[in-house]
Amino acid sequence: MNSNPTRDLILDSAQALAQARGFNGFSYADIAAEVGIRKASIHHHFPTKHALETELLERYRATFIAELNSIESSVSGSVERLQRYAQLYTNTLSNHCICLAGMMASDVGALPEQLKPSLEGFFREHMEWLTKVLAAGKSAGELNFDGSAPAQASAFLAALQGGLLMANAMGDDAVFKKLKQTLVSQLKS
């Protein structure tokens, strides 16, 4: 991925708009107005909206992977790792946004085929990380749950993604915060 100030501003604007409105809820004109550039400048960096979406998702995935690695290296207990992971979603909601990958998933039928593997990759990466945390926590006696770690990881991720949508639709961040507390509490030994 190329990086320059204008390109980064375009991506930042597009991400904020996509997370607040969805990809079909904004245009290059909206980005141009927000960044203070002409639409032609956006087309110079991203000839198509699909090219913009692809780079935006890859950047988002890389940011989340860095966050997961940070949690992994700075937190030792499974319960705290799950809390820190869930906090990433709380931060998104605090910015009146939805997870970019969750927003894309809600519109998967309209996504270009070349974007779908990257979107699937986002969710697989998260499920693999959560599976590892959950399995380690269960093995160490920190966590207690029925079923397999992969099944629990899937449920945990789905609950967080759905919780963001629900809290956003209801305009009530407390809905998500309660869900997050309940999810982690139910897993504690």
Image (cartoon, rainbow, N blue to C red):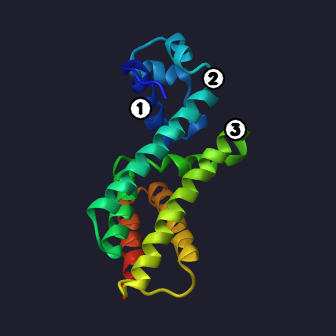
Structural distance between the alpha carbons of marks 3 and 1: 22 Å
Instruction: Give x and y (percent) for residue 125.
Output: 53, 57
Q: Quadrant of residue 35?
A: top left
Mark 2–mark 1 CB contact (< 8 Å): no
Residue at disc 2, secondary structure: loop
Sooner in the amino-acid sequence: mark 2 or mark 1: 1
Which residue type carries mark 2? Thr
Please state which amino acid type lies under the numbered disc 3.
Answer: Gln
How many numbered marks does the figure carry? 3
Alpha-carbon span between mark 2 and mark 1: 17 Å
Q: Disc 1 marks which amino acid?
A: Asp
Residue ID for mark 2: 48
Q: Which quarter shows the C terminus?
A: bottom left
- Please tell me whether mark 3 or mark 2 is closer to you in this view: 3
What residue is shown at x 49% (from left), y 29% (from top)? 1
The disc placed on residue 12 is: 1
Secondary structure, mark 1, is helix
Question: Does 85 sit left or right of 135 as displayed?
Answer: left
Q: Write the residue at 42% across / 75% down.
A: 183
Q: Is residue 164 above or below residue 80?
A: above
The residue at the point 51 percent across, 57 percent down is 165
Question: Residue 131: x percent and y percent?
Answer: 50, 71
Residue depicted at 37% across the width and 69% down the height: 82
Q: Which mark is residue 114?
A: 3
Name the side, left or right, on which 127 lies relative to 67.
right
